[in-house]
Amino acid sequence: MVAKKFNPLPGFKLTMGYTVFYLSIIVLIPIAALFLRVSHLSWKEFWDMATTDRAMAAYRLTFGASLIAALANAIFGTLLAWVLARYEFPGRRFIDAMVDFPFALPTAVAGLTLASMFHDNGWLGQYLVPLGIKGAYTRLGVVIALTFVGMPFVVRTLQPVLENFEREVEEAAATLGAGRLRTFVSVIAPSLLPPIITGFALAFARAIGEYGSVVFISGNLRMKTEIAPYLIVERLEEFNYAGAMALAVVLLVASFLLLVVINMLEQWAGKFVK
Amino acid sequence: MAGNVKKHLGAGHAKSQRGTEESPFVKWTLIIIALLFCLVFLLLPLVNVFAQAFSKGFAAYWQALANADSWAAIRLTLIVAAITVPLNTIFGVAAAWAVAKFEFRGKSILITLIDLPFSVSPVVAGLMLLVLFGAQGYFGPWLEAHPIHLFGHTYEIKIIFAVPGIVLATTFVTFPFVARELIPVMQATGREQEEAALTLGASGWKTFWYVTLPSVKWGLLYGIILCNARAMGEFGAVYVVSLGVIGETQTMPLRVYQLYNEPSHIEAAFAVATLLAVLALVTLGFKTFLEWRQAKEFELAQQQVVDRQIVDGG
């Protein structure tokens, strides 16, 4: 890669060289190694190992629970971003700072504390379990953990858009006789949709790979609450490396596809924010 | 006066005071739902960590932490972060310099590649290292067959189930943090200041140290502290490459998991978890402080512009 225009600043070759070198060592070579190893398997071997009943159950749970968690985050995240950007109420700044808490908290701690909260005699479980809402060792628990982990994404992509939203547009709608609901649906919502969808996709992508928080709360019951990353670890502990790699490649390809979608979404969303 | 008018109008049109505001009922319903969500998903989980840790009293809490294996886990976590964070910081600065200060073909591809580790499951990241350095991996058998002879001793280079593997796994997972925070900040500061310093005869390094670094230091610090929080808290990738041998390759998050799986030690799991929760709170506190500072600096700059206009106008 060569610098295009004349640029008097020094160090391009050094920093670029180091960037590419370090990127290759830490990221690219390991990824390439995994694909290379899997390419030694025949297609049938790969397919059989990647689509066992247990694997299919794990994919269903991973993608299903991630989807529900990302949807929950899209709804509550939008609400939270709206409330934080538009209203003044006691504790607003505290909540605003706390929204990033799931990013900062190690996933193991998140899993530990959520599992204990939703356990039969936990802070929430003691009221919810008698109502039939079991959070610990169930699929619902997986959704709860993934919702926690993905919570900041929608809020943080939407909040700046809401804060920079031109109030004049809303005023114009109001002057033209639109009610508040009408204004929201036909004036505000369309420009909020791109950041919400981007945040949703980010939360979904994060949820698919999540391991730490889920293994605490799900109980990892065979065919029931096993997520795909957990099954990879299981395969490794059985010394079934080929089986683990087959699952890993499926997950990896899914996340790469999502990455492409997210990049496209961000470009699309960028058109709406000037 | 204005307040009175507003209040008066409000009394008459309780449904909506202004066309651009929701009615108080809608507003407070939304606020209450949002607060409830935050209570369940932010506040309770945090308070619960400390409540459970101290549920058997302070002595039990202290005893759980003073345990030799817990200490070993704390020490290992600190060592791993102390290696990983500087490595990724040097990379982040180099990458940000190349990406932010120069134009070249393939820039967006490079940025995407830098972000790549974010979209790889930590478990898969660990597995990749097994493929490279495990007993049946590409370089594993070679490393085993080629021990290093140093000062009359023979050392086998162990990567998997050892500290180097944990460091590599953590480095992979925390790879993008510093670069990601730094690139937009460095892009925003532009090139003019550096160009001026170079014209005045400063060397490249001097320009970097005295011109570039001071202008991006807060962004850099924020990237470092995020990277550190994630490095100390990484679980999946580290578990796969180390399996968390007690007292040897067990970091703090792995210690939490092991204690959690022994039902009689659940308070001890929470005791170790409090340290990680404090780390998260410190990270958040630092972030809030940085945002406050930035807002303040922005305000100050705005004020200076206004002052100058007044002086110029006078």
Image (cartoon, helix red, strand yellow):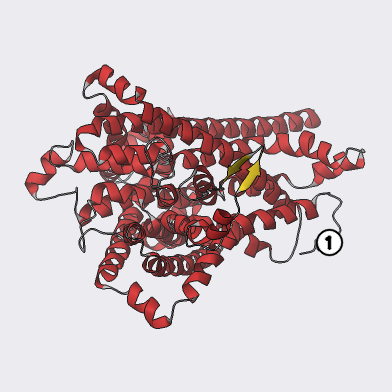
Q: Residue at label 1?
A: A5
Furthest residue toward top: B59
Q: Position of residue A94 (x, y in %)?
A: 40, 32
Asked if residue A113 can be seen in this view, the reply is no
Image quadrant where residue B41 sits: top left
* Marker count (numbered): 1
Image quadrant where residue B178 sits: top right
Q: Nearer the viewer, residue B208 or B255?
A: B255
Asked if residue A126 can be seen in this view, the reply is yes
Furthest residue toward left: A130
Q: Nearer the viewer, residue A177 or B202?
A: B202
Furthest residue toward front: B152
Quadrant for the N terminus of chain B in the image: top left
Please give left or right for residue A143 compared with residue B209 in the image.
Answer: left
Query: For numbered disc 1, what is the local secondary structure?
Result: loop
Q: Position of residue A193 (x, y in %)?
A: 42, 61
Q: Chain of mark 1?
A: A
Quadrant for the C terminus of chain B in the image: top right
Q: Position of residue B236 (x, y in %)?
A: 40, 50
Against A124, is B141 above or below?
below
- Give amino acid for label 1: Lys
Against B306, is A273 above or below?
below
Q: Position of residue B111 (x, y in %)?
A: 62, 58
Q: Residue at x 40, y 36 (%)?
A: B252
Q: Nearer the viewer, residue A45 or A53?
A: A45
- How many residues crowd around disc 1 within 10 Å: few (fewer than 14), some, or many (20 or more)? few
Q: Residue at x 38, y 79 (%)?
A: A45
Q: Nearer the viewer, residue A253 or A51?
A: A51
